[in-house]
Image (cartoon, rainbow, N blue to C red):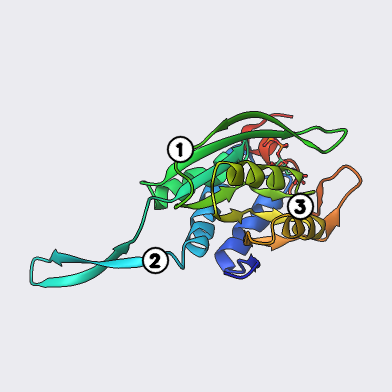
Amino acid sequence: MDSVTVVDHPLVQHKLTFMRKRETSTAGFRRLLREISLLLCYEVTRELPLTMEHVETPLAEMDSPVLEGKKLVFASVLRAGNGLLEGMLDLVPSARVAHIGLYRDHATLEPVEYYFKAPEDLSDRLTVVVDPMLATANSAIAAVQKLKERGARDIRFVCLLAAPEGVAKFTKAHPDIPIVTAAIDEKLNEKGYIVPGLGDAGDRMYGTK
Ligand code: PRP
Ligand code: URA
């Protein structure tokens, strides 16, 4: 997989525009994020290995492809990651789930960890880290570091929006981890927000401030 993939599918771009709009409601924002997550999941899983299984249709026997290997893991960076997680679980219901509780300290922009729970055996599973926003990349870098310490080796990072500064920093810290995103915006502002962006993803998802 390329080190950075921008998913330029028209449905993704259309839905992202509505997520950016200030007037989009909390319910609308959540629904759009869930819908986009299906399309991002399609992209990040397109190279999953297959194996053949012998099946009987009502008409004949055949060998037909099924996913090979251990169940994959979705790792959600709380809170906003859960908006991507839910749609991905719709597509891959048998996936295992890791939760990584991190929030950005507003003054330092450094991640503060408050929770971590992951399946035991990460070493031979694809782990897809989900978080809508890659801003300074401090949260994503820390989340991936935790997963690597727990043995994960095949990791991909999926977000909705990225800042060029975040992409550069993440790629330098974890050159082995591909990024899948719906867009790379112009820049970070002085408070570490993505511009033009969509605001604070967690607050918009949950109606907090
Ligand atoms: C947001 C977002 C990322 C992080 C990105 O979470 O969901 O986790 O900021 O910023 P960074 O790339 O500069 O680290 P936030 O800290 O607002 O927590 P929340 O999801 O609980 O609202
Ligand atoms: N986190 C967000 O939710 N939005 C940004 O623009 C940056 C970090």
Disc on res. 120? 1
Ligand 2 near label 3 (Cβ, under 8 Å)? Answer: yes
Most extreme residue toward the right, as rendered? 190
Asked which secondary structure carries label 1, the reply is loop
- Which residue lies under the disc numbered 2? 49
Decide if residue 149 is on the left or right side of residue 97. Answer: right
Disc 1 residue type?
A: Glu
Label 2, residues with CA under 10 Å away: few <14, some 14-19, many ≥20: few
Label 1, residues with CA under 10 Å away: few <14, some 14-19, many ≥20: few
- Which residue lies under the disc numbered 3? 197
Asked which secondary structure carries label 3, the reply is loop
Give me the C-alpha separation between circle 3 and circle 2: 34 Å
Asked which secondary structure carries label 2, the reply is loop
In terms of image quadrants, where is residue 150?
A: top right
Most extreme residue toward the left, as rendered? 59
Q: Nearer the viewer, residue 189 or 152?
A: 152
For marks 2 and 1, the one nearer the N-term is: 2
The image position of residue 181, as x and y in percent, is 64, 60
The structure residue drawn at horizontal position 75% and vertical position 59%, both measured from the top left corner, is: 167
For marks 3 and 2, the one nearer the N-term is: 2
Quadrant, the N terminus:
bottom right
Disc on res. 164? none
Disc 2 residue type?
A: Pro
